[in-house]
Image (cartoon, grey):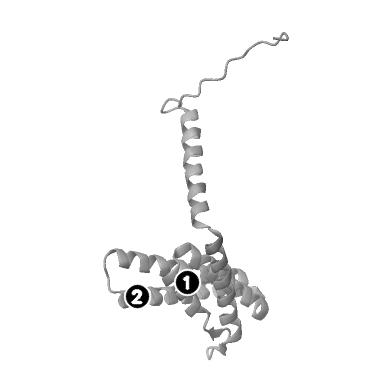
């Protein structure tokens, strides 16, 4: 109209299979789907419960401490709250609440353990939740599923802290 040249819009059909553009289009679709799932998972209510359980794990870890007879470290009730998270809310929830809550408590008690605590306690909750989820699928009785998951999580925690101390004190 004012001397501009009309450029038609590009073809919006899906690229051919095997091409790089097909790969990019597939990835963008897949990531878009995952983002939508994340939006469904992280509702306001779920985030509030995650923050509440993170605080409960931190308080249970920090308030009730029994010094370990073996030397360094302490026994606490925070693991109980991590296992409650694993039983009620699932893997990701228990990883975040367990890892972050215990790491926050360790920031006040033994700050040099905090990064290891985040990983170890987070994995403890994650593994326990996945075991509970898997055993429920095969119709295992709930008490047996919970006991199996909690024992496996506790063993993982012990092995994780043993590895962490080996890394920390071997330098």
Which structural element holds mark 2?
helix
Query: Cβ–Cβ below 8 Å for labels 1 and 2?
Result: no
Report the front residue among 40 and 121. Answer: 40
Residue 17 is left or right of residue 108, and the answer is left
Question: Could you classify mark 1 by the number of other residues whose Cα lies within 10 Å: few (under 14), some (14-19), or many (20 or more)?
Answer: many
Q: Is residue 14 above or below residue 100?
A: above
Q: Residue 146's image quarter?
A: bottom left
Rendered image: mark on residue 85: 1
Question: Could you classify mark 2 by the number of other residues whose Cα lies within 10 Å: few (under 14), some (14-19), or many (20 or more)?
Answer: some
Q: Quadrant of the N terminus?
A: top right
- Give the labeled residue for mark 2: 148
Give the x, y percent position of residue 3: 72, 8
Which structural element holds mark 1?
helix
Rendered image: mark on residue 140: none
Give the residue at x 51% y 20%: 11
Q: Is residue 169 visible?
A: yes
Give the residue at x 35% y 78%: 147
Report the front residue among 137 and 152. Answer: 137
Give the x, y percent position of residue 45: 54, 63
Mark closest to the chain's N terminus, 1 or 2: 1
Give the x, y percent position of residue 171: 62, 71
């Amino acid at each position: 109209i004012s001397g501009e040249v009309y450029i038609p819009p590009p073809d919006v059909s899906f690229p051919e299979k095997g091409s790089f553009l097909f790969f990019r289009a597939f990835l963008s679709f897949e990531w878009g789907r995952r983002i939508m799932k994340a939006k469904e998972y992280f509702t306001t209510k779920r985030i509030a419960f995650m923050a509440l359980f993170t605080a409960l794990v931190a308080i249970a870890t920090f308030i009730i401490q029994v010094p370990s007879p073996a030397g360094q470290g302490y026994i606490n009730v925070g693991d109980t709250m991590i296992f409650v998270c694993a039983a009620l809310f699932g893997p990701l929830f228990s990883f975040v609440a367990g890892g972050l809550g215990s790491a926050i408590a360790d920031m006040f008690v033994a700050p040099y353990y905090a990064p290891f605590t985040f990983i170890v306690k987070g994995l403890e909750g994650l593994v326990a939740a996945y075991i509970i989820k898997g055993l429920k699928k095969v119709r295992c009785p709930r008490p047996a599923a919970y006991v199996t998951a909690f024992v496996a999580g506790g063993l993982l925690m012990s092995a994780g802290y043993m590895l962490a101390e080996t890394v920390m004190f071997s330098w």
